[in-house]
Amino acid sequence: MAARKIIIDTDPGQDDAVAILLALASPAELEVLGITAVAGNVPLALTAKNARIICELAGKPDTKVFAGCDAPLTRKLVTAEHVHGKTGLDGPQLPAPQMPLQEQHAVDFIIDTLRAEDAGAVTLCALGPLTNIATALQRAPDIAPKIAEIVLMGGAYFEVGNITPTAEFNIYVDPEAAAVVFKCGTPLTVMPLDVTHKALTTAPRVQAFRDMGTEPGRMVAEWTDFFERFDKEKYGSEGAPLHDPCVIAWLLQPGLFSGRKVNVEIETQSALTLGMTVADWWGVTDRAENALFIGDVDAEGFFALLTERIGRF
Ligand code: RIB
Ligand code: CA
């Protein structure tokens, strides 16, 4: 079976980095057409730099990396250095990337690629705020029916928010962009905190990366060591939730996950609940079921996949 064509839209971020490594370690199943950086965890200049660092760490310097939007559609950028550190990839020391950034703007790359490929050939994997994808949809509404599926890490319902009491970071940074994406009609699979908070690194799981004796394995362990201090402190959890790798794991082994097709709307007006993903979990409205909202994961199976694939480098 031909590899599934994907574009990864991302704001690296240690968990984005693990997701990108997972994708690049799976060429038989996933053809990464390009990686589009967006402002989020850290400003765009850093997310575009970090995306290239990760590609070089994976030994894939020919991967096309594009810089996209440096701010949300209408709001001021909110970043998350308190979680990811100043560089966005704090933890290990990493050399500056040698590979070039593509000249083309990420939004133009997304539009041109979707127009050039057959309908249903390309899946968008969104690991950060949805600014790039929403801008592409606004500029070229004709691409919406051509997208096979948008698989995104974002939102929360029963798990509530991680940046405000009601909002998850990726949605909160650009709620207007999220509203555009959730209304675009493309098949949506959503990995909210409800499921990513069940994909927790634990000491044995991190040790498995360290025991690989490879640079990628060491990096994943050291990124986790840094990244997990925030969640351990806040939630008293055993480890860090590997949010973004859930998006790629869905494409590789969807059977690891379970969820429900529901209506999800985005709060864009209320200051109190801005960025909330309002999931009609019990079907009490007649609003269209626009998203597969994932609530559960086989964590052991998820880490077995992650370890096996990262171990391939
Ligand atoms: O809330 C978690 C999400 O926000 C993850 O994608 C993380 O990388 C940050 O972007
Ligand atoms: Ca991210």
Image (spheres, rainbow, N blue to C red):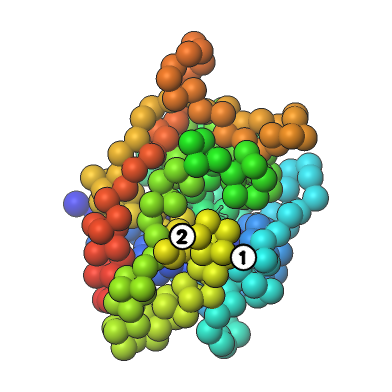
Q: CA distance from mark 2 to mark 1?
A: 15 Å
Q: Give the percent coordinates (x, y) of residue 16.
A: 50, 63
Above-or-below relation of 198 to 96: above
- The amino acid beneath tag 2 is Ser
Residue 55 appears anywhere in the view: no
Q: Give the percent coordinates (x, y) of residue 69.
A: 69, 54
Q: Quadrant of residue 187?
A: top left
Above-or-below relation of 76 to 134: below
Q: In the image, is 81 to the left or to the right of 151?
A: right
Within 10 angstroms of label 2, few (less than 14), some, or many (20 or more) residues? Answer: some
Q: Residue at x 70, y 36 (%)?
A: 274
Q: In the image, is 283 to the left or to the right of 76?
A: left
Foreground pick, 59 / 155: 155
Q: Give the percent coordinates (x, y) of residue 209.
A: 33, 77
Element type at mark 2? loop
**Residue at the limit of the structure toward the left, as seen here:** 1
Residue 237 — which label? 2
Q: Is mark 1 within 8 Å of ligand 1?
A: yes
Q: Residue at x 53, y 45 (%)?
A: 154
Residue 83 — which label? 1
Foreground pick, 141 / 123: 123
Element type at mark 1? helix
Above-or-below relation of 306 to 262: below
Q: In the image, is 175 to the left or to the right of 291?
A: right
Q: Nearer the viewer, mark 2 or mark 1?
A: 2
N-terminal label among 2 and 1: 1
